[in-house]
């Protein structure tokens, strides 16, 4: 069989997308490295040329998702008809909607990240996504300070705290997933929503806004997101 | 040689303390599992009975440190001559002093936790310590609300955010450690201090306090802590 020569970026992207399709149909845990290479028609050597491990491929997929989300959010992030607070809220609202839409597929692929042994990988994935959105958040907050909508002398710091607080969802998500009764689950969902409100309040107050200025998903939106996640 | 029968807890504690002494004198990375068992006069089987790995032993040492810190902080945490804000600040002040005193030894033992491949272990260690201090912080904040010093309807949430914000030191510490010039290091130290002030402000505002109410170490205290850490 003649060897097909492909551009390395294209080949990498094909391996990623074919693995994604496998994960989506069978779930990450039920797909072996051998399944991935057989499905892609490549050797182990070629696979390892692009990815150090199945976990590294998962991290690359998460990175691809984050870049896609960034592209999807581009319109609201650059909508100059909105003031900085409206842009921040449009970003958060659309971000929640995108997450809810993607949730069922995302869970089949990324649910494995929430296992204790993958905590390090989870952290790396979150950090990569935070670095991607960081300059945009800083830009919006800086613009808001210029327009005297926000009052802070540390836009970078507030942008970081916004992301850091948003990423404290880990323990709540695991608690919801591991709930053994309907009541446990409802309590975990309420606790999650309560924490999201407190996080929003922390950023409101750091920006000199009145409480409730920043978008926080409603309890029913949280329930919808989580039911799609674990369904 | 007759077998010496020891109580399992005592044996475990001995292995921990002997490993600690080795780590303190040579640094965690320069001590192998074989060094640990040879020094303790035990077999690999006995070691694995108590610890899954050298990393698990490190996590157990971190847990021991956290419990010791809790014991050392017991007097200020229970000093009823102090009001809840004063108790919170005494806790934070003494915590910083303890960290500064322990820093040189702690670094020889726990510096390895700040390596990228140990991110998962680092997270587990931090989480264990947070769970230990959580009920105490909740108790102080709840008491402060009762005494109308603090204004929040979510003492648990504020306690969690306080710890979550305090643990965002990771990226700053790694930046300080990896600084290649004196100027990079000074900038990283200033950035760290600036973030600590913002964290303090977030909690001040969530508790309905005026800015600067919560203790935040000064820049020179931060420098002292970090110089002892990496010396």
Image (spheres, coloured by chain):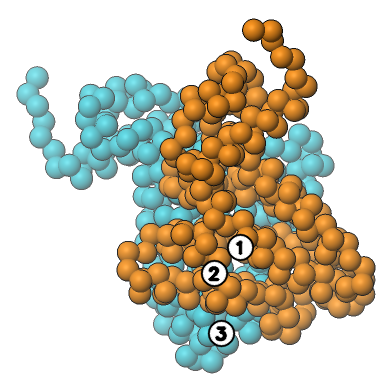
Chain colours: A orange, B cyan
Q: Position of residue A62 (x, y in %)?
A: 63, 44
| Secondary element at tag 1 | helix
Give the camera-side residue of B225 and A39.
A39
The CA distance from mark 1 to mark 3 is 31 Å
Position of A10 relative to A228 (above/below): above
Q: Position of residue A194 (x, y in %)?
A: 53, 76
Position of A82 relative to A212 (above/below): above
Report in which chain the residue with disc 2 lies.
Answer: A
Residue at position x 75%, y 28% from top? A10
Res A224 label: 2
Point out the tag, 2 or 1, that comes first from the N-terminus.
1
The CA distance from mark 2 to mark 3 is 28 Å
Asked whether the beta carbons under mark 2 and mark 1 sit within 8 Å of each other, the answer is yes
Residue sitting at the far left: B2
Res B152 label: 3
What residue would you read off at disc 1? A100
Residue at position x 75%, y 27% from top? A9
Report in which chain the residue with disc 3 lies.
Answer: B
Position of A23 relative to A130 (above/below): above
Q: Is residue B168 left or right of residue A119?
A: right
| Secondary element at tag 2 | helix
Image quarter hosting the N terminus of chain B: top left
The CA distance from mark 2 to mark 1 is 7 Å
Where residue B149 sits, quadrant-wise, is bottom right
């Amino acid at each position: 069989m003649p060897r097909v020569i492909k551009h390395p970026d294209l080949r990498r992207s094909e391996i990623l997308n074919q693995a994604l399709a496998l994960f989506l149909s069978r779930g990450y845990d039920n797909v072996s490295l051998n399944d991935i290479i057989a499905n892609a028609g490549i050797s182990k050597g070629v696979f390892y040329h692009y990815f150090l491990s199945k976990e590294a491929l998962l991290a690359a997929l998460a990175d691809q998702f984050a870049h896609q989300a960034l592209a999807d959010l581009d319109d609201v992030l650059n909508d100059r008809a909105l003031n900085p607070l409206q842009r921040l809220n449009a970003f958060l609202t659309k971000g929640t909607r995108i997450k809810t839409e993607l949730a069922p597929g995302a869970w089949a692929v990324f649910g494995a990240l929430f296992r204790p042994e993958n905590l390090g990988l989870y952290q790396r994935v979150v950090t990569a996504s935070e670095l991607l959105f960081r300059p945009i958040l800083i830009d919006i907050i800086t613009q808001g300070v210029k327009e005297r909508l926000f009052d802070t002398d540390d836009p970078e710091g507030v942008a970081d705290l916004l992301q850091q607080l948003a990423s404290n969802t880990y323990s709540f998500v695991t608690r919801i997933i591991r709930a053994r009764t309907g009541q446990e689950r409802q309590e975990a969902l309420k606790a999650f929503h309560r924490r999201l409100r407190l996080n929003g309040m922390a950023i409101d107050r750091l920006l000199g806004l009145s409480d409730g200025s920043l978008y926080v998903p409603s309890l029913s939106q949280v329930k919808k997101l989580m039911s799609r996640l674990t369904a």
